[in-house]
Amino acid sequence: MQMMQKFAGHDIRQARQLIGLTQRALAAKLDISAAYLNQIESNQRPLSAAVGERLRQKLGLDLNSSPDPLVEHWIAQGLPADARMRAAQALQICPEIGDWLQRQMLPAAVPHSEDAYAEIGDWFYLQDNHIESLDRAAEGVFRDAGFRITELDRDLEAYLRRFGVQVDLVDDPALARGYDSTAKRVQLGRWLTPAQRAFQLAQQLLWLQFSDRVEDIVKAANLTSPAADPVLRIGLANYFAGALVMPYQDFLQAARDERYDLERLQRLFQCSFESVCHRLSTLQRPGNKGIPFYFVRVDAAGQIMKRQSPAGFHFARQGGACPLWNVHEALSRPDQILVQRVRTPDERQLLCLAQAVIKPGPRHGDPARRFAVGIGCELRFAPDIVYADGLDLTGVSGVTDIGPGCRHCLRPNCAQRAFAPLGKAVHADIHQRARVPLRWG
């Protein structure tokens, strides 16, 4: 059976989790190295015909078929690996069982269909967080219009006049941007910085010049949640604006030249720390990719507010993030970029960077917004990143073991564990107390 080469990292990772194998164990079954499988799952290497055939023959995984929509539910609910395997076999024998379960359990089995933001996060994940048509459009406008980074808000204001649109600054602390299509007037909050004004005007430019591209993308996405389409449009507008204020090739070359110095990139492109980090996570143009960074924004309660992961980093949807991850420490150490080397349960090692971000209110007395922003990548990219200089990249003592969150992590001896994993029965013994109090079967 011949299979065309394709990028199938998401499907392979999902199938591996279904049968309860680590990357190392699956690599051994396929007679390939764990590093090679990691590259396949991270979409850094295509799935070859030979490896695809081994997956089909040895494990019964046919990647030409659609992944089962119940798999994610089984994993999230902590169904043991052997039970998942038996359930999968039952579905292969009688697919009608899966159809019935999906109809009966749709809200629980496919939670992202009820949550527009989660579904859109999944959609961006499947695109490797890169929207080529919008990136090309933004880069082309920046070049052809002769925009300047140092005067971008003024250049965009002048550019919008070509469409008969005027820009007004208003003293409304609740307003960032508003558009009156009848009067053709954009209102911007006077409290916005020049960089924030440029970002908002770039979004308005998208709707005036490239709205057809957005609608083509939304239609092709075929999202299921009722609220997903308008939320996706906003996400695409944010993507376009980031791509315009940080044009792909210029930004990628600067990132390489500066060895991904986040502070230097902020100054060069006059953007915020968060904007620079998010843009780095989108640099996945075919044939001209940057380092595949994950991007995350976490609030003071540990809730993940934003997540993007072309790096294939797994974010738990329920139960909070791992407390050992440096994004949590960043909130207590403002004005510092924290550097951490971590190891995930599937034995991957990552370089993680995090910093607290404070966004003051428009006026005195208005509450500030506080959260932490983190990016990271596989450790093999560390030599290209300035923050890894002087960091022990090989020693045993220099690595922190983290997981996707207590509810989804099976590490038995974690001193920070707050809950037992989903589906695990807690063992309680009144005569014994270990350093780690939670034990399970």
Image: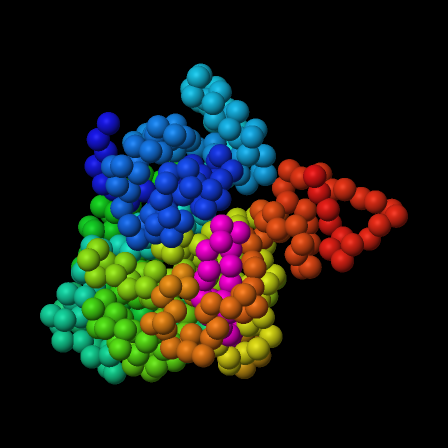
- Look at the image and tell me in which quarter the C terminus lies: top right
- 103 or 32: nearer the viewer: 32
In front: 254, or 38?
A: 38
Magenta stretch mostly in which secondary structure?
A: strand
Residue 180, horizontal then vertical, whole percent: 29, 62
- Residue reaching furthest to the right: 431
Q: Residue furthest left?
A: 144
Q: Residue at x 44, y 16 (%)?
A: 94
Residue 299 seen from this side: no
User: Which residue is nearer to you in this view: 278 or 213?
Assistant: 278
**Percent position of residue 327, x then y:** 53, 67
* Residue 331 percent across, percent down from the top left: 57, 72
Residue shown at 48%/32% (left/top)?
Answer: 70
Depth order, front residue of 293/126: 293
- Look at the image and say whether residue 187 sits in the magenta stretch: no
Residue range highlighted in magenta: 338-360
